[in-house]
Amino acid sequence: MSTANKLSGKAVIAGIGHTAFGKHPGRGTVSLNVEAIRKALADAGVEKSQVDGLLVKAPTSKFEMMYAQKLAEALGMVPRIGGVYDHGGASNISMISYATMAIEAGQCDIAIVALADNPATGTRQAYEKSYGDDGSGLYGWFGTPAGYAMIARRHMGEFGTTSDQLGAIAVACRKHGAANPHAQLRKPLTLQQYRESRLIAAPLRRDDCCLVSDGAAAVVIMSAQRAKELGVAKPIPILGFGQGQTSWDVALRADLTSTAASVSAQTAFAMAGLTPGDIDVAQIYDCFTIAALMTLEAYGFCAKGQGGHFVADGRIEIGGALPVNTAGGLLSETGMPGLQLVIEGVRQMRGDAVSQVRGAAKCAISNQGGIMHTHSTLILGN
């Protein structure tokens, strides 16, 4: 048995917390992070003095040096290990995996993983910039949607994927978000309304694109043994995790319809000793609908090129074959990059989600960064 397999189930997510999602005018990322962390500690029943690991995603909108130390000072904590990590939206699950390994190695006892950002009321410059070092901005490649639009167009050309099939993902996420009292956008979406939404970067429409959101989220990680000693009420075992990274920018990739999500998922499933068929519910990074569709393919829930057929006819809605993004995902709950998906996965495994999938015992969660540059996978279960 590999070292990774030996880690399966040895660490747990003991607590979860988040701010309201949407707009927080006048609040910075440190303030938002502190609120989410306090809620996660209260949920776990842990005092901040017991925490000795602090891993934080770099705020995308405004990067700051020594940010983790600034946050630790605001919290009144002195962690043994920690720092700021940047894999884009894949950072969160990557940090959870690092925390798990650090705990197993005896480098820390209890760790917090957190993120906060405020692009809705702060600055969106990081998302609006020109891409590429080859003058791509001269040809209209401004902002993140353009890169995903190129990928979506190639997927359509190679496999016959349709706009309506992308729309089925938006419809499912918006349906789930409408039932979530914490969601930023609580408006269900029909396929006809999707068709009528304006184009952002063809073929992607407004409802193919995630929300822009202020907010923060945090989780508390510890060993299963420590959770037992502390009497944590509902610890959720971490069964598997993995990463995959692409070194090439979009314009330089030989294949736009392949993603490092496949490597990430294979690593996580092997560690957990599970297959896609064992998964009851999935929280899939949906910064854009094409990203969610390609991740479902890469994870092995369907064959490459068959994602459009897989998501049709309500298959990814609650009550379908594989419920996806049961709190609304980035398209409806919050555009925050990824940790909210982990929190919803924990709630599904606890059995106390707002839109609970009956009998759910295994959950796969994806995080993605850049324009399909980085990917991390987490598998939770009971």
Image (tube, rainbow, N blue to C red):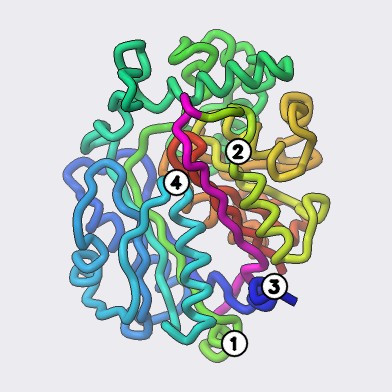
Task: Tell me the element at label 2.
Answer: loop
**Local crowd size for mark 2, using a 10 Å CA cut-off: few (<14), some (14–19), many (≥20):** many
Q: Nearer the viewer, mark 3 or mark 4?
A: 3
Query: Given the image, on which type of amino acid does mark 4 rest?
Result: Gly
Q: Which residues are magenta?
A: 232-252
Residue 240, position in %: x, y?
A: 65, 64
User: Which residue is denoted by mark 3 in the rendering?
Assistant: 5
Quarter of the image holding residue 173? top right
Residue 183, position in %: x, y?
A: 47, 41
Cβ–Cβ below 8 Å for labels 4 and 2?
no
Q: Nearer the viewer, mark 4 or mark 2?
A: 2
Lower sequence index among marks 4 and 2: 4
Residue 347 position (above or below residue 335) = below
Q: Is residue 170 visible?
A: yes
Q: Nearer the viewer, mark 1 or mark 4?
A: 4
Q: Residue at x 17, y 44 (%)?
A: 26
Q: Residue 239 colored magenta? A: yes
Q: Residue at x 52, y 17 (%)?
A: 204
Viewer-proximal residue, 166 or 43? 166
Task: Tell me the element at label 1.
Answer: helix
Query: Given the image, on which type of amino acid does mark 2 rest?
Result: Thr
Point out the image quarter for the N terminus: bottom right
User: Which residue is denoted by mark 4 in the rendering?
Assistant: 89
User: Which residue is denoted by mark 1 in the rendering?
Assistant: 225
**Local crowd size for mark 4, using a 10 Å CA cut-off: few (<14), some (14–19), many (≥20):** many
Residue 182 position (above or below residue 241) = above
Task: Tell me the element at label 3.
Answer: helix
Residue 10, position in %: x, y?
A: 63, 79
Residue 382 position (above or below residue 229) = above
User: Which residue is denoted by mark 2 in the rendering?
Assistant: 259
Cβ–Cβ below 8 Å for labels 3 and 4?
no
Query: Given the image, on which type of amino acid does mark 3 rest?
Result: Asn
